[in-house]
Image: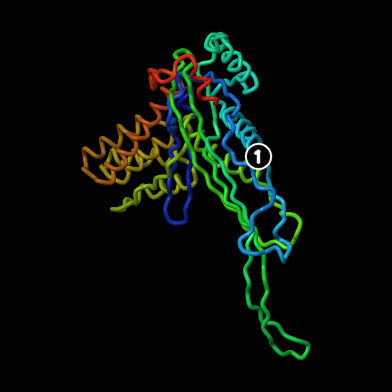
């Protein structure tokens, strides 16, 4: 199992540059919240923001714009926007976590039915456990607002008449402006204990501003803007819940003092032939103690997927040379090893559960979180 994980975690990447050659070490970064014991999850529908203010019938204006015909343009949204945003947030979270391939997910429509039954006396805990669910995720729109208005600006323009003579004229232009605010959260509940595992919140703001010329309509779509705001949180949520692969690019140590015998090794590395490059660097370090050759042998060993072997080589080179550059490489390799190991523990679910034993919630925790 571990060999399969390691092969999944470590891939070889060689980055080329015109002057120096770098090799990339691909590795896993553990999720911020350890979900290793919660791989079977249920996602509820997003709780809408019930405090959302109903919009005025008309978009407010800054200044007296009635004489220009801009005082009675209908608002671009209605009270139903809160439900549209919540529905989109549900779909976005479900599709994002499904696409990660990390979880087995009970969809929102099924989760909602179980939670609704639980609110009238049936045991949501028993039903979730019967279905093998480890944790329930309840997303929520905690707050949202739209502040839209129309304003004018008068500018002085220089024009020419038919005789080519310049003259100045005042021109009034009209603009639409909107400020959007969204506070979005999700809470993870341990099914077995019905205690909160973690809660995360996001605050997202956006604006819209453009010149208008139509007295009757404003062509903008707040639901799309809120959708983009929701989507902007999804990559962050993925990092919070799913171990992800990343890479670090590290440049080969320069051949100084120069040893002509390893010049070919740099060419091999640049061409992506890491095995040949490694062989030359290792051979030269063993025979001469050339620090750049030892450094590069350790680095390429890591790039080929053997972080433990790379650490062994780097430790030996550092002990022999005391090189600060080698020490820095050794520290980075040790950090990569720890990151991989923690990611594997999360993937295998071998860490103990960490729970926030908040006694303010008990049997009604789901109802409390869905209000």
Q: Position of residue 244 (x, y in %)?
A: 48, 33
Quick one: SS at disc 1? Answer: helix
Category of crowding for the residue at label 1, using alpha-carbon neighbours closer than 10 angstroms: few (below 14), some (14–19), many (at least 20) = some
Q: Position of residue 211 (x, y in %)?
A: 67, 62
- The residue at which mark 1 appears reads as 81
Front one among 190 and 266: 190
Residue at the right extreme?
A: 162
- Residue at (64% x, 45% y) in the render: 55
Q: Is residue 291 left or right of residue 19?
A: left
- Regarding residue 200, the answer to whether it shows in the image is yes
Q: Position of residue 284 (x, y in %)?
A: 32, 42
Vertical comparison of 65 with 251: above or below: below
Quarter residue 290 falls in:
top left
Front one among 35 and 355: 355
Q: Position of residue 208 (x, y in %)?
A: 61, 54
Vertical comparison of 233 with 36: above or below: below
Q: Quadrant of the C terminus?
A: top right
Vertical comparison of 331 with 35: above or below: below
Q: Is residue 147 left or right of residue 353?
A: right
- Residue at (41% x, 20% y) in the render: 360
- Residue at (67% x, 64% y) in the render: 65
């Amino acid at each position: 199992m571990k060999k399969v994980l390691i092969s999944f975690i470590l891939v070889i990447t060689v980055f080329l540059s015109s002057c120096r050659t770098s090799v990339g070490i691909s590795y896993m970064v553990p999720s911020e919240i350890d979900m290793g014991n919660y791989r079977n999850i249920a996602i509820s529908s997003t709780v809408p923001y019930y405090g959302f203010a109903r919009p005025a019938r008309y978009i407010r204006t800054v200044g007296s714009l009635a004489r220009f015909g801009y005082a009675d343009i209908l608002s671009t949204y209605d009270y139903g926007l809160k439900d549209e945003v919540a529905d989109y947030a549900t779909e976005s979270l479900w599709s994002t976590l499904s696409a990660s391939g990390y979880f087995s997910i009970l969809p929102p429509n099924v989760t909602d039915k179980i939670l609704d039954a639980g609110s009238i006396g049936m045991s949501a805990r028993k039903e979730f456990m019967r279905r093998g669910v480890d944790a329930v995720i309840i997303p929520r729109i905690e707050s949202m607002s739209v502040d839209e208005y129309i304003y004018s600006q008068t500018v002085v323009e220089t024009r020419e008449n038919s005789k080519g003579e310049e003259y100045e004229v005042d021109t009034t232009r009209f603009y639409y402006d909107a400020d959007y605010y969204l506070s979005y959260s999700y809470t993870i509940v341990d099914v077995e204990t019905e205690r909160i595992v973690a809660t995360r919140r996001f605050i997202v703001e956006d604006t819209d501003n453009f010149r208008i010329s139509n007295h009757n309509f404003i062509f903008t779509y707040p639901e799309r803007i809120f959708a983009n705001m929701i989507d902007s949180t999804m990559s962050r949520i993925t990092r919070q819940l799913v171990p992800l692969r990343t890479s670090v690019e590290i440049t080969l140590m320069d051949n100084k003092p120069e040893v002509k015998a390893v010049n070919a090794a740099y060419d091999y590395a640049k061409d992506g032939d890491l095995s040949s490059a490694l062989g030359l660097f290792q051979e030269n370090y063993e025979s001469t103690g050339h620090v750049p050759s030892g450094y590069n042998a350790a680095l390429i060993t890591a790039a080929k997927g053997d972080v433990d072997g790379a650490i062994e080589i780097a430790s030996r080179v550092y002990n022999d040379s005391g090189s600060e550059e080698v020490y820095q490489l050794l520290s980075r390799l040790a950090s990569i090893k720890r990151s991989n190991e923690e990611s594997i523990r999360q993937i295998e679910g071998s860490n103990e559960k960490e729970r926030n034993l908040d006694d303010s919630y008990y049997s009604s925790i789901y109802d409390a979180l869905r209000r």
